[in-house]
Image (tube, grey):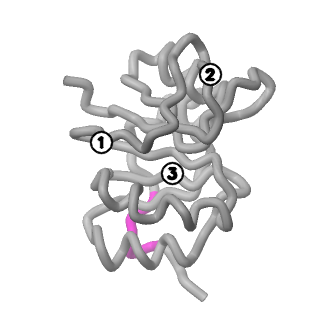
Amino acid sequence: MNDYKTVVLGATTNPQRYAYRAVEQLQEHGIETIPVGIRKGSTAGIPIRNDRPTIAAVHTITLYLNAQVQQEYYDYILSLKPKRVIFNPGTENPELYGLLKKELPETIIEIACTLVLLSVGSYKTVLNRPENIKQD
């Protein structure tokens, strides 16, 4: 079992996008990666799931969807019961922080860049805990 199984929500077939690069980098770091997106295709050689699959033992969901698009995924995100959700730049969402804190209080909320975390070797180090997230 991979201790850091990661769902990349907002996966894309475009190699110029950060979500695509995240899948590549996660794979290079030996982290089991499940790309989930809107369009069919593959990213870094892995088929993109469009069906909101049930996935057991998810450690991290890394978001590449803006706050408005995230709304349609709230139930899906909660259903996966991740140990951590990473809000990459441009995906910050106080509404979802609140839902996570209410429904999954043990889930760690990180406002960070997955690519940076991987590049500096701190992806497997938790930086922000839910109690540190400020809500307006």
The part of the chain drawn in magenta is: 128-132
> What is the secondary structure assignment of the residue under circle 1?
loop
Q: In the image, 13: left or right of 70? A: right
Label 2 belongs to which residue?
41
Going 33% across and 33% down the picture, which residue do you hit?
A: 4
**Dot 2 or dot 3, earlier in sequence:** 2
Describe the element under mark 2 as helix, strand or loop.
loop
Q: Residue 109 has which mark?
A: none
Mark 2 vs mark 3: give the one in front.
Answer: 2
129 magenta-colored: yes
C-alpha gap between disc 2 and disc 3 = 24 Å
- The amino acid pointed to by label 2 is Gly
Indicate the amino acid at tag 1.
Answer: Thr
Q: Label 3 belongs to which residue? A: 86
Whichever of labels 1 and 3 marks the residue nearer the N terminus, that label is 1
Tell me: residue 12, above or below residue 103: above
In primary-sequence order, the first of circles 1 and 2 is: 2
Q: Which quadrant is the N terminus positioned in?
A: top left
Q: Quick one: SS at disc 3? A: strand
Locate residue 36 relative to residue 15 in the image: left or right: left
Report whether 103 appears left or right of 28: left
| Residue topped by disc 1 | 54
Q: Amino acid at mark 3?
A: Ile
Between the residue at mark 1 and the residue at mark 3, the CA separation in whole angstroms equals: 19 Å
